[in-house]
Image (tube, rainbow, N blue to C red):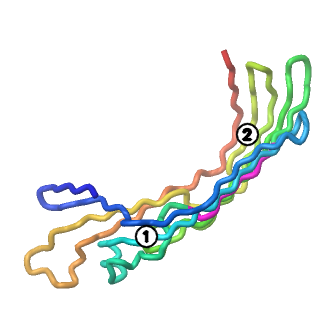
């Protein structure tokens, strides 16, 4: 726990007391031929808050332990990717190629109370171009299907000293919840040269 004080407002950062984590991660790359490769990954991340004293949980849910048994925020339970790349001779030292990638991110929660969800995210990206050992020129498009899944959350809490004579229901913990905006579809042409 980190504790800091300003003239009027004490603040602290508190980690969850104990969380059970288990899961698996797998990644593979397969050369189906000299020209065609597939790659993929899978991740399963199960988390469960086991011990905690959560001040904001007390304010929002009426209990210091309202987050017990909940999942950690900003941690999707399931993620996976699948991609492919095909390369073939073009002329002289030049080859042409195309590549496609699909990535999935499951729901994740914004806070330890597990109320706000991000929604799933499914991103498709495509690339095609020409290359040599030193030069690569490609056309690309990212987020082809205009996925609007929320990429990340952030929560902020201000702990206030109550004014004199404040009612018993005074909110000591004003909250804010922010989230990142998804990237829009992008497309273009890029070139890389290796010296």
Q: Is residue 147 visible?
A: no
Q: Is residue 187 visible?
A: yes
- Dividing the picture into quadrants, the one containing residue 174 is bottom left
Q: Return the x and y of residue 121 as percentages of the image width and height.
A: 64, 60
Residue 57, quarter of the rendered image: bottom left
Magenta stretch contains residue 165: no
Name the residue furthest top. Answer: 195
Magenta highlight: main SS: strand
Picture residue at 55% right of the left edge, 57% below the top: 151
Secondary structure under badge 2? strand
| x 89%, y 35%: residue | 35
Mark closer to the observer (1, 2): 1
Q: Which numbered tag is attached to residue 160?
A: none
Q: Residue at x 71, y 51 (%)?
A: 41
In this rendering, position of residue 161 left or right of residue 111: left
Q: Residues within 10 Å of mark 2 (few under 14, many from 20)?
A: some
* Quarter of the figure that contains the N terminus: bottom left
- Percent across and percent down for residue 27 are 70, 48
Of residues 125 and 107, the one drawn nearer to the viewer in this rendering? 107
Q: Name the residue rendered at 86%, 18% in the picture.
A: 93
Q: Nearer the viewer, residue 185 or 101?
A: 101
- Is 8 on the left-hand or right-hand side of 142? left
Q: Position of residue 45 (x, y in %)?
A: 58, 62
Q: CA distance from mark 1 to mark 2?
A: 38 Å
Badge number at residue 140: 2
Which label is found at residue 112? Answer: 1
Query: Which stretch did the figure color magenta?
Result: 76-84
Q: Is residue 188 above or below residue 95?
A: below
What kind of element bears circle 1?
loop
Mark nearer the N terminus (1 vs 2): 1
Label 1 crowd bin: few (<14), some (14–19), many (20+), radius 10 Å? many
Q: Quadrant of the C terminus?
A: top right
């Amino acid at each position: 726990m980190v504790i800091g004080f300003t003239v009027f407002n004490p603040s602290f950062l508190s980690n969850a007391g104990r969380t059970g984590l288990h899961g698996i991660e797998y990644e593979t790359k397969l050369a189906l031929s000299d020209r065609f490769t597939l790659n993929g990954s899978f991740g399963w991340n199960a988390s469960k808050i086991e011990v905690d004293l959560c001040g904001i949980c007390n304010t929002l849910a009426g209990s210091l332990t309202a987050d017990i048994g909940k999942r950690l925020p900003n941690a999707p339970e399931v993620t996976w990717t699948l991609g492919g790349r095909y390369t073939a001779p073009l002329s002289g030292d030049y080859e042409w190629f195309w590549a496609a990638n699909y990535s999935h991110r499951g729901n994740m929660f914004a806070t330890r109370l597990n109320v706000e969800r991000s929604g799933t995210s499914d991103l498709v990206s495509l690339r095609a171009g020409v290359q040599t050992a030193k030069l690569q020129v490609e056309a690309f498009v990212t987020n082809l299907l205009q996925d609007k899944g929320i990429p990340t959350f952030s929560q902020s809490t201000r702990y206030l000293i109550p004014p004199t004579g404040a009612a018993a229901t005074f909110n000591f913990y004003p909250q804010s919840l922010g989230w990142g905006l998804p990237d829009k579809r992008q497309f273009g042409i890029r070139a890389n040269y290796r010296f």
